[in-house]
Amino acid sequence: MDTTQLVSEFLASNHGAQALQALGTQGVSDADARDLLSHATGAAVDHVESQNTGMMGDHPGKSFLAAFAAGLVHGDGFFKSLVDGGEGVMAGRVAEALGVRVGLDPATASSIAAAATPYIVGFLKQRLS
């Protein structure tokens, strides 16, 4: 899987446009949003490639459980909560990568990851299935 190609495809896709808009509503400039989304998408692709078990990996841990439990508490239902749990794992990986690659503080990295990850996951599901 060519990470650079997937990042370019994501940024040119409808999912990418929606992610850019989501970051824009948080006050992130278009140029910064593109840079952040490039890093975030690259981190998501790297995570998927490093796991032979799929997008969640071998030990998704507490990110999954936290998002799954939050979905159940909010009344989202079992299956919607499972999806949210998987996105929680990916959001954790993306936030971690943004902190390391871009030098964002944990709160900002988490906020950016929360806004961008659903679009990245949607794109990857569509592209890799």
Image: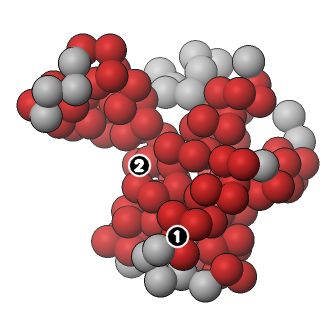
x, y percent for residue 80: 33, 22
Q: Is residue 11 above or below residue 5?
A: below
Percent from the top left, x then y, of residue 61? 31, 31
Residue at 71% across / 27% down in the picture?
126
Which kind of residue does numbered mark 2 sit on?
A: Gly
| Helix, strand or loop under label 2 | helix
Q: Is residue 100 visible?
A: no
In the image: residue 89, left or right of residue 61: right
Residue at 75% across, 25% down: 128
Instruction: Decide if residue 47 is on the left or right side of residue 49.
Output: left
Q: Residue furthest left?
A: 73
Left or right: 102 as drawn, with respect to 6? left
Disc nearer the start of the sequence (1/2) = 1
Q: Quadrant of the C terminus?
A: top right
Residue 42 relative to residue 110: left or right? right
Q: Please give the name of the residue rendered at 58% of the width and 16% of the height, measured from the top-left corner.
A: 53
Q: Which residue is mark 2?
A: 92
Quarter location, residue 37: bottom right
Q: Secondary structure at mark 1?
A: helix
For label 2, the crowd category at 10 Å Cα-Cα, with few meaning under 14, some 14 to 19 and many 20 or more, is: many
Identify whether 41 is placed above or below 33: above
Amino acid marked by disc 1: Leu
Between label 1 and label 2, give the one nearer the viewer. 1
Q: Position of residue 1 (x, y in %)?
A: 86, 34
Q: Which residue is mark 1?
A: 23
Label 1, label 2: how far apart the Cα atoms are: 17 Å
